[in-house]
Amino acid sequence: MATFISVPLKKSSEVDLVKPLSKYITASYPAGEEQAEYIRAVEELNKLRKNALGRPLDKHESSLEILLRYYDQLCSVEPKFPFSENQLCLTFTWKDAFDKGSLFGGSVKLSLASLGYEKTCVLFNCAALASQIAAEQNVDNDECLKAAAKYYQLASGAFSHIKDTVLSALNREPTMDICPETVGTLSLIMLAQAQEVFFLKATSDRMKDAVIAKLANQAADFYGDAFKQCQYKDNLPKYFYFQEVLPVLAAKHCIMQANAELHQSILAKQKKRFGEEIARLQHAAELVKTVASRYDEYVSVKDLTEKINRALTAAKKDNDFIYHDRVPEVKDLEQIGKAALVKATAITPPLSQKYTDLFEKMVPMAVQQSMSVYNQRKAETVNRLVGTMREATNLCNGVLASLNLPAALEDLSGDSIPQSIAEKARNIVEQGGLQSIEQLIKDLPELLTRNREILDESLKMLDDEETTDSELRTKFNQRWNRTPSGDLYKPLRAEGANFRNVLDKAVQADQVVRDRYNSHCDMIALLCKPENELNSAIPSANPTKTLQGSEVVNVLRSLLSQLEELKKERETLEGEIKAVTFDMSTTFLTALAQDGAINEEQLSLSQLDKLYNSYNQRVQASLCTQEELLGQVQTAHQEFSSLKQSNTEANQREEVLKKLASAHDSYVEISSNLREGTKFYNDLTEILLKFQNKCSDIVFARKTERDELLKELQQSIAREPSAPSFNVPAYQSSPAAPGPTPAPRTVFPQQPQVQQQSQSNPQPPPRPPPPNITPQAASTTPTNTPPTGPPTSNPPPVAPPSQAQGPPYPTYQGYPGYFQMPMGYNPYAYGQYNMPYMPYQTTPGQGGYPGAPPPGQPYQGYPQQPPQQPYYPQ
C-alpha cells in the first residue's frame, strides 16, 4: 500500500555566470576591495550552480540543502543585478522534466533570458527532490514518517508557489512541466501523500479509530481531487508520467476510502451498530476488490484485503447467529468526518538552514536606481547654484569691462599700461596664450569623431541583429516565438538617440565657443605680446593727473574692491557647494525595508532642500549685493567720466583698454569652456564604450538565443510527420491483370472444408504471362487428382512470424498446386518443395510477354518438374 509518487528532476544546460556578472560589477563599481569582493562572490555563485545543477544529485537531505541554498541565493541576487533581455542578459536553458523526447527531435526544452525562469526551474527541482527523498523513507520508522511528511508538504508548497508565480516570472508560455495546471496537480498529489503519511503514523501509534478514519477519509478526498485534476485537464494525460500516475491515484483513493470504512466499522462495532459494521466492511471489501482487479500491477492490497475479509466474515457470523441487526445500504450510512493535518509549506526565502548572502553588502537595484536619480538631482542643484554665481560674475566682469574699470582708474597718466591690463596679460601668458586654446580647439573634432564612431558602431550592431531577426520571423512566422528585436531594443535606441542629441548640442556649443574665440582672437594675441609691444599698441592720451586722489576715484576703487571680495566669496562658496556629500543609500534601504518600495522623488527633494537651502540663500544674497554695488559703480563712473577731459585720443585709448579687458575675460571663459568640453567628450567616450559593451552583450545573447531556437525548430521539424497521403502512379496501384490477392498461408487439417471452399470459389481471370527465360525440364501435375497422403519429401509450409494468419490460398482450375505458381509471383517458392533456385536473367531490349497458352497446356519457357503429389489438398 505504501507506494508513493515522486517527480523527476529537470535538467539544465551549463551557464557561465562569472563573465557577465563580473563585467557588470567592473563597469558599475570602482576598482578596490569592494569590487574584488563582489567578483569573488560571483565565482562562488557559479560554483554553487554547478554543484546544484551540474551533476546528478543523491536522494539525500544534503543534496536538497544545496538546491535550496542556490534558490535562496538567486532570490537575494535578483534585486541587485539588472537581469533582463536588454541589460544583463543571461540565457538559461531547461528541458521538460516529463517529456522523454524522440529519436530524432530530442526532448522539449525552453531557453529564456530571465532569472525568474531560472528561479522557477530550481524551485521545481527542489520540490521534485523533496518528493524523491520522501518516497525513499522507511514507513515503519517514526522519524522517517515525520521526515516524509515534512518533505511532501515542502514539495506541495513549492509546486503551489510555482503555480502562482510562473506566468508573471516568464511573461510567455512555459513548458508543460511548469505550467500552472501541471504544478497545481503535483501540489495536490504531494499534499495527499503527506496526509497519507499522517494516516500511517496514526495507525502505527494505535490512535483512536475515529481519528484514523477521519485521517484516511481526508487522504481519500485529497487523492480524489488530484485524480480529477489529472483526468479533466486535456494536456496532462498526454504525458507518459501522468498516464502512469493516474492508476496509482485511483487506487490510493479507493484504498484510503477502504481504510476509512474499516476503522469506522470498528467504531460502529464499539457502539453496537452491527448492521452498520457489516455495511461498511462490505463497502471496504468492494473497494479493495476494485483495486485488486484494476490496479494490482501498481499497488498491492493483499494484506488489507485479508484484514477486511476476516473482519467481515466474523461480523456476518456474529450478526447471523446472535444480533440479527439489519444491514443498511451504503448510501444510508452516516458520512465519515475529515481531519486535515497537512498544509503546503509557504515558500518564504531563505529556505536553507545554512544560507549566507554572498552579496550582502551590495545594495539592491531599486536602491541603485534611486541613488542614480538622486545623484542626478544633486548634480542639477549644484550646477544651478554654481551656474547662477558664474553668470553673475560674468555679468559683473562685462559691466566693468564696458566701463573700462579698473583700467580707467589706473590709466590717469595716459601713456603707460594700466596695472590691471598688465596682470591680465601675464595671466594669459601663464595659461599658455593662444597656443593652448588653439590646441584645445583642434582636439575637439577628433574627440567628437571618436564618440560618433562608437555610437554609430553600437547602433549598427543593433540594426544588423534586428534585420536578421526580422528575416527569420518572416521565414518561420508563428514558430519564431521570441521577443522581437525591435521591441527589445527600444530602450537602447532611445538611449542612443539621447546620446546623438547630446552630441549635436555639443557641436553647436563648440561652434559658439569657436565664434567667440575668433571675435577676440586679435586682442588676445595682443595681450600675449611683450610689455613694450603691448604699450606701443595702446594709443596715448592727454594726462588726467588732476583726478588723482579725487573723491570719485576713491569711491570707485572702494566699490571695485568690494566687487573683488564678492567674487572671492563666490569662489569659496562654489567650493563648499561642490563639497557637500550625503549617503542616501541608508535612507533608501530603510524605506525599502519598511514600505517595500522607494518614493525617490519625495525623499531626494526633501534631503536636497535640507542640504542646499542655506547655500541657496547665500547665493541669492550675493546676487543682491552685486546688483547694489554695480548700481553704485555706474553712478560713480558717470561722475568720473564727466570730470575727465574728453578727446579723440582718450576715447581711442579707452576703447582699446576695454577690448583688452574684455579679451582677457573671454580668454578665461573660452579656456574654461574648452577644457570642460574636452572633459565632457572624454567622459562621454567612457559612457559610450559602456553603451557599446551593453549593445554587444545583448546582441551576443540574442545570437546565442537565435541559434538555440533554430536548433529547436530543426528538431521540431524533424519530429513532424510527413505528408499524410500522396498520389500513387497508376502503374503501381493497378495490377496488370486482375486476380486474387494472396494471403499468408495457413494449414487447415479438415479436408472437406477446403474442398467445399475450392468448389465455391469463382473461376479466376487468365493468368498473366511469365517472363521469358531459358526453358528447362518441366512437369505437369494433374488438376483433379485426389491426394493419397501427405508428401514425404516436402515439409509443411510455415508462415513468416511477422505475418498474421489468414485463410488458405484458394485453388482454381488451371492452378494445379501451390508449388506450381509462377516464380515471378511467389517469392517463397525458391528453395522449397525440391525446386531449384532460378536466377532471373534480364536481356536488353527484351520483348513483351507472350500470350497465355490454351487451357491445360504448360507455359512455354517454364522449367518442368517431375510429377509429384501436391501438399495442399485439392
Image: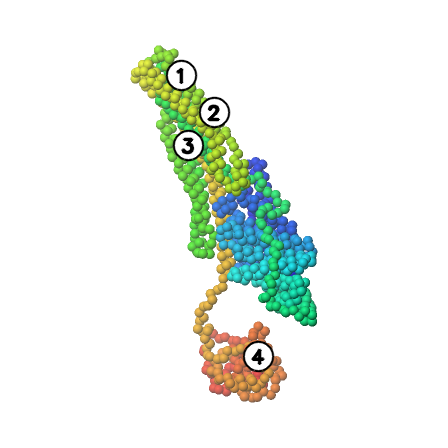
Q: Amino acid at mark 3?
A: Lys
Residue farthest to the top, as pictured: 546
Q: Write down the residue under mark 1.
A: 557
What residue is rendered at 57% in x and 55% in y? 187
N-term mark: 1 or 3: 3
Within 10 Å of disc 2 (Cα), the crowding (few <14, some 14-19, many 20+) is few
Labels 1 & 3 near each other (Cβ < 8 A) = no
Q: Write down the residue under mark 4.
A: 746
Q: In front: mark 1 or mark 3?
A: 1
Residue 790 figure quarter: bottom right
* Residue 678 visible in image: no
Within 10 Å of disc 4 (Cα), the crowding (few <14, some 14-19, many 20+) is some
Is 762 or 165 nearer to us in this picture?
A: 165
Within 10 Å of disc 3 (Cα), the crowding (few <14, some 14-19, many 20+) is few
Q: Write down the residue under mark 3.
A: 442
Q: Is residue 359 above or below residue 704?
A: above
SS label for mark 4: loop
Q: CA distance from mark 3 to mark 4?
A: 103 Å
Q: In front: mark 2 or mark 3?
A: 2
N-term mark: 2 or 3: 3
Q: Write down the residue under mark 2.
A: 572
Q: In front: mark 3 or mark 4?
A: 4
